[in-house]
Image (spheres, rainbow, N blue to C red):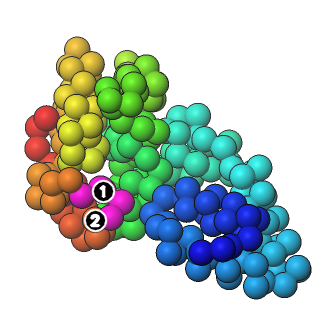
Amino acid sequence: MDVSSKVKLLIDEISKLPGIGPKTAERISLYLISMDEQAIDEFINIVRDAKESIHLCPVCFNITEETVCNICSNANRDHSIICVVEEVGDLFAIEKGGEYSGVYHVLHGRIDPLNHISPEDIKIRELVKRVSEGGIKEVIIATNPNFNGDLTATYLKKVLTPYDIKVTRIATGLPKGVEIDFVDSVTLSLAIKERKEA
Ligand SMILES: [Zn+2]
Protein backbone atom coordinates (compact mmCIF):
# COMPACT_ATOMS: atom_id res chain seq x y z
CA MET A 1 0.00 0.00 0.00
CA ASP A 2 1.37 3.38 -0.99
CA VAL A 3 0.47 5.46 2.07
CA SER A 4 1.81 8.93 2.78
CA SER A 5 4.80 8.71 5.11
CA LYS A 6 3.16 11.03 7.68
CA VAL A 7 0.08 8.83 7.85
CA LYS A 8 2.31 5.80 8.13
CA LEU A 9 4.16 7.43 11.04
CA LEU A 10 0.84 8.12 12.78
CA ILE A 11 -0.32 4.52 12.26
CA ASP A 12 3.03 3.23 13.61
CA GLU A 13 2.75 5.41 16.74
CA ILE A 14 -0.84 4.39 17.43
CA SER A 15 -0.06 0.70 16.96
CA LYS A 16 2.42 1.05 19.87
CA LEU A 17 -0.55 1.59 22.21
CA PRO A 18 -1.50 -1.48 24.26
CA GLY A 19 -4.15 -3.70 22.72
CA ILE A 20 -4.12 -1.91 19.35
CA GLY A 21 -3.45 -4.11 16.34
CA PRO A 22 -2.39 -2.73 12.92
CA LYS A 23 -5.93 -2.70 11.53
CA THR A 24 -7.32 -0.75 14.52
CA ALA A 25 -4.31 1.59 14.41
CA GLU A 26 -5.16 2.35 10.79
CA ARG A 27 -8.82 3.03 11.63
CA ILE A 28 -7.93 5.31 14.56
CA SER A 29 -5.37 7.19 12.43
CA LEU A 30 -7.85 7.81 9.63
CA TYR A 31 -10.43 8.95 12.19
CA LEU A 32 -7.96 11.38 13.81
CA ILE A 33 -7.07 12.82 10.41
CA SER A 34 -10.76 13.32 9.63
CA MET A 35 -11.39 15.32 12.84
CA ASP A 36 -11.66 19.10 12.45
CA GLU A 37 -8.89 21.37 13.79
CA GLN A 38 -10.77 22.38 16.94
CA ALA A 39 -11.69 18.82 17.88
CA ILE A 40 -8.13 17.62 17.39
CA ASP A 41 -6.78 20.51 19.51
CA GLU A 42 -9.21 19.63 22.30
CA PHE A 43 -8.21 15.99 22.09
CA ILE A 44 -4.49 16.82 22.28
CA ASN A 45 -5.10 19.19 25.21
CA ILE A 46 -7.02 16.56 27.16
CA VAL A 47 -4.17 14.08 26.71
CA ARG A 48 -1.55 16.68 27.69
CA ASP A 49 -3.58 17.91 30.67
CA ALA A 50 -4.09 14.36 31.94
CA LYS A 51 -0.38 13.68 31.61
CA GLU A 52 0.62 16.93 33.36
CA SER A 53 -1.80 16.78 36.27
CA ILE A 54 -1.51 13.09 37.10
CA HIS A 55 1.28 11.62 39.20
CA LEU A 56 1.81 8.50 41.27
CA CYS A 57 0.38 8.28 44.79
CA PRO A 58 3.40 8.26 47.13
CA VAL A 59 1.76 5.55 49.28
CA CYS A 60 0.41 2.95 46.83
CA PHE A 61 1.67 4.19 43.40
CA ASN A 62 -1.82 4.40 41.92
CA ILE A 63 -2.25 7.35 39.56
CA THR A 64 -3.85 10.44 41.06
CA GLU A 65 -4.40 14.17 40.71
CA GLU A 66 -4.39 14.61 44.50
CA THR A 67 -1.40 14.54 46.84
CA VAL A 68 -2.42 11.03 47.95
CA CYS A 69 -4.86 8.93 45.88
CA ASN A 70 -8.55 8.76 46.80
CA ILE A 71 -8.24 5.11 47.89
CA CYS A 72 -5.36 5.78 50.32
CA SER A 73 -7.14 8.86 51.69
CA ASN A 74 -10.47 7.06 52.17
CA ALA A 75 -11.01 6.42 55.90
CA ASN A 76 -13.76 3.89 55.13
CA ARG A 77 -11.31 1.48 53.52
CA ASP A 78 -9.42 -1.16 55.45
CA HIS A 79 -5.85 0.12 55.55
CA SER A 80 -4.58 -3.09 57.16
CA ILE A 81 -5.12 -5.10 53.95
CA ILE A 82 -2.97 -4.39 50.91
CA CYS A 83 -3.75 -5.92 47.52
CA VAL A 84 -0.60 -6.02 45.36
CA VAL A 85 -1.14 -5.63 41.61
CA GLU A 86 1.21 -5.35 38.67
CA GLU A 87 -0.34 -2.34 36.95
CA VAL A 88 -2.83 0.47 37.57
CA GLY A 89 -5.19 -1.23 35.08
CA ASP A 90 -5.39 -4.24 37.43
CA LEU A 91 -6.39 -1.93 40.29
CA PHE A 92 -9.09 -0.42 38.05
CA ALA A 93 -10.36 -3.93 37.21
CA ILE A 94 -10.63 -4.89 40.90
CA GLU A 95 -12.26 -1.56 41.79
CA LYS A 96 -14.91 -2.16 39.11
CA GLY A 97 -15.99 -5.24 41.07
CA GLY A 98 -16.81 -2.89 43.96
CA GLU A 99 -16.32 -5.63 46.57
CA TYR A 100 -12.74 -5.13 47.71
CA SER A 101 -12.48 -2.64 50.57
CA GLY A 102 -8.77 -2.77 51.41
CA VAL A 103 -6.03 -0.65 49.87
CA TYR A 104 -3.52 -1.39 47.10
CA HIS A 105 0.12 -1.40 46.13
CA VAL A 106 0.93 -1.06 42.43
CA LEU A 107 4.26 -2.66 41.48
CA HIS A 108 4.45 -1.05 38.03
CA GLY A 109 5.67 -4.24 36.45
CA ARG A 110 6.58 -7.80 37.32
CA ILE A 111 9.83 -9.69 37.75
CA ASP A 112 10.79 -10.72 34.22
CA PRO A 113 14.24 -12.28 33.89
CA LEU A 114 14.05 -12.57 30.09
CA ASN A 115 13.55 -8.81 29.81
CA HIS A 116 16.06 -8.07 32.59
CA ILE A 117 13.43 -6.76 35.01
CA SER A 118 14.59 -7.59 38.51
CA PRO A 119 12.91 -6.96 41.90
CA GLU A 120 14.77 -3.65 42.23
CA ASP A 121 13.14 -2.37 39.04
CA ILE A 122 9.60 -2.52 40.40
CA LYS A 123 8.03 -1.14 43.59
CA ILE A 124 8.83 -4.12 45.84
CA ARG A 125 11.20 -2.25 48.14
CA GLU A 126 8.44 0.30 48.75
CA LEU A 127 5.97 -2.48 49.61
CA VAL A 128 8.34 -4.06 52.13
CA LYS A 129 8.91 -0.64 53.70
CA ARG A 130 5.14 -0.12 54.00
CA VAL A 131 4.72 -3.50 55.69
CA SER A 132 7.71 -2.92 57.99
CA GLU A 133 6.15 0.31 59.23
CA GLY A 134 3.38 -1.76 60.84
CA GLY A 135 -0.41 -1.67 60.86
CA ILE A 136 -0.70 -4.25 58.07
CA LYS A 137 -2.50 -7.54 58.74
CA GLU A 138 -2.61 -9.04 55.29
CA VAL A 139 -1.02 -8.71 51.86
CA ILE A 140 -3.07 -10.17 49.01
CA ILE A 141 -0.92 -10.95 45.99
CA ALA A 142 -2.88 -10.33 42.79
CA THR A 143 -0.14 -10.65 40.20
CA ASN A 144 -1.13 -12.22 36.89
CA PRO A 145 -1.54 -16.02 36.71
CA ASN A 146 1.39 -16.53 34.32
CA PHE A 147 5.10 -17.31 34.57
CA ASN A 148 6.31 -13.83 35.52
CA GLY A 149 3.31 -13.19 37.77
CA ASP A 150 3.97 -16.46 39.63
CA LEU A 151 7.66 -15.63 39.90
CA THR A 152 6.82 -12.21 41.35
CA ALA A 153 4.34 -13.78 43.80
CA THR A 154 6.95 -16.29 45.02
CA TYR A 155 9.47 -13.51 45.51
CA LEU A 156 6.96 -11.34 47.39
CA LYS A 157 6.05 -14.24 49.67
CA LYS A 158 9.76 -14.70 50.44
CA VAL A 159 10.47 -11.05 51.29
CA LEU A 160 7.27 -10.71 53.35
CA THR A 161 7.79 -13.89 55.40
CA PRO A 162 9.83 -12.15 58.16
CA TYR A 163 6.85 -9.94 59.01
CA ASP A 164 3.97 -11.00 61.22
CA ILE A 165 1.30 -10.74 58.52
CA LYS A 166 -0.86 -13.07 56.47
CA VAL A 167 0.27 -13.38 52.84
CA THR A 168 -2.41 -14.64 50.44
CA ARG A 169 -2.74 -15.04 46.70
CA ILE A 170 -5.98 -14.55 44.80
CA ALA A 171 -7.76 -17.79 43.93
CA THR A 172 -6.51 -19.92 41.10
CA GLY A 173 -10.02 -19.94 39.65
CA LEU A 174 -8.64 -17.29 37.31
CA PRO A 175 -7.96 -18.73 33.88
CA LYS A 176 -4.23 -19.48 33.55
CA GLY A 177 -2.41 -17.01 31.35
CA VAL A 178 -5.25 -14.51 31.21
CA GLU A 179 -4.24 -11.01 32.31
CA ILE A 180 -6.11 -9.66 35.33
CA ASP A 181 -7.38 -6.55 33.61
CA PHE A 182 -9.17 -8.76 31.07
CA VAL A 183 -11.02 -10.79 33.69
CA ASP A 184 -14.61 -9.72 34.35
CA SER A 185 -15.21 -7.98 37.66
CA VAL A 186 -17.46 -10.71 39.11
CA THR A 187 -14.82 -13.42 38.59
CA LEU A 188 -12.18 -11.07 39.97
CA SER A 189 -14.20 -10.27 43.11
CA LEU A 190 -14.71 -14.00 43.65
CA ALA A 191 -10.98 -14.67 43.17
CA ILE A 192 -10.20 -12.13 45.90
CA LYS A 193 -12.86 -13.49 48.22
CA GLU A 194 -11.53 -17.04 47.79
CA ARG A 195 -7.87 -16.11 48.19
CA LYS A 196 -5.57 -18.70 49.73
CA GLU A 197 -2.52 -18.63 51.95
CA ALA A 198 0.43 -18.01 49.60
ZN1 LIG B 1 -2.66 5.59 47.05
Give me the disc on residue 183: 2
Q: Amino acid at mark 2?
A: Val
Q: CA distance from mark 1 to mark 2?
A: 5 Å
The answer to whether mark 1 and mark 2 are in CB contact below 8 A is: yes
Secondary structure under tag 2 reads loop
Is 168 positioned to the left or the right of 36 in the image?
A: left
Compare residues 111 and 9 and report the one nearer the observer. Answer: 9
How many C-alpha atoms fall within 10 Å of the one at disc 2: few (<14), some, or many (≥20)?
A: some
At a point 38% along the width and 31% down the height, the residue shown is: 115
Badge count:
2
Q: Amino acid at mark 1?
A: Ile
Check residue 180 for magenta coloring: yes
Give me the disc on residue 137: none
> Is residue 7 placed above or below 121 in the rendered structure?
below
Compare residues 40 and 63 and report the one nearer the observer. Answer: 40
Q: Which residues are magenta?
A: 178-182
Kindly indicate the quadrant of the structure image that contains residue 13.
bottom right
Q: Which residue is mark 1?
A: 180
